[in-house]
Image (spheres, rainbow, N blue to C red):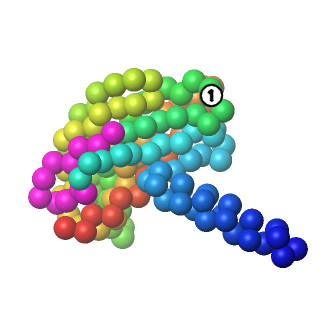
């Protein structure tokens, strides 16, 4: 038991670190993950640019449908202008014209299809300035 606990803690720490770096979410149903990478933090004062990644953990084909920005504020929400999305490679897209117009928690909503099922994953993004 004394040996198992430290090993389990090391594995948990590595798993937690990997998930924190991902900056995305995965579906328990379709086993598809959506994440983003950005060179600079998003702000309310300049255009956001990022790489959107859409990958299947079980190697099944995933078809990108759309992505948008959304901020829920109590009983109403705020969207953003349409994003400019440019495919770069299978499951990889350059996204520009991402305008986070106010501080708070935004969502990058990514819709895709796999095996004739449509699903939307929501990636939370905190805008601080």
Residue at the right extreme, as displayed: 1
Q: Is residue 20 left or right of residue 109?
A: right
Q: Secondary structure at mark 1?
A: loop
Residue drawn at 27 percent across, 64 percent down: 127
Q: Which x, y percent locates residue 82?
A: 23, 39
Image quadrant for the C terminus? bottom left
User: x, y percentage for residue 123?
Assistant: 43, 52
Whole-percent x and y of residue 55?
52, 35
Furthest toward the front, the residue is 3
> In the figure, 104 relative to 49: above or below?
below
| Rendering quarter of residue 71 | bottom left
Quadrant containing the N terminus is bottom right
Residue 45 belongs to the span the image colors magenta: yes
Q: Which residue is mark 1?
A: 59
Residue furthest out toward the bottom: 2
Q: Is residue 20 visible?
A: yes
| Residue closest to the eye, 6 or 28 | 6
**Can residue 80 be spotted in the picture?**
no
Residue at 23% over, 53% down? 40
Q: Quadrant of residue 9?
A: bottom right
| Residue at the image position 38 percent from the left and 34 percent from the top | 66
Q: Nearer the viewer, residue 35 or 27?
A: 35
| Category of crowding for the residue at label 1, using alpha-carbon neighbours closer than 10 angstroms: few (below 14), some (14–19), many (at least 20) | few
Q: How many marks?
A: 1
Give the main secondary structure, helix, strand or loop, of the magenta stretch: loop
Query: For residue 61: magenta?
Result: no
Instruction: Note whether 33 is above or below 6 in the view shown.
Output: above
List x then y, in percent, for residue 41.
25, 57
Q: Which residues are magenta?
A: 41-51
Q: Is residue 67 above or below residue 100?
A: above
Q: Residue at x 37, y 55 (%)?
A: 107
Q: Is residue 55 left or right of residue 108?
A: right
């Amino acid at each position: 038991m004394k040996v198992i606990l430290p090993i389990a803690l090391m594995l948990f720490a590595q798993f937690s670190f990997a998930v924190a770096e991902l900056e995305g979410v995965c579906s328990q149903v379709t086993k598809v993950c959506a994440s983003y990478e950005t060179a600079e933090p998003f702000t309310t004062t300049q255009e956001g640019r990022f790489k959107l990644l859409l990958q299947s953990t079980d190697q099944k084909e995933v078809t990108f449908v759309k992505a948008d920005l959304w901020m829920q504020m109590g009983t109403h929400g705020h969207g953003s202008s349409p994003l400019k999305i440019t495919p770069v490679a299978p499951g990889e897209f350059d996204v520009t014209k991402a305008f986070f117009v106010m501080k708070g928690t935004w969502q990058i909503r990514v819709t895709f299809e796999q095996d004739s099922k449509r699903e939307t994953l929501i990636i939370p993004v905190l805008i601080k300035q």
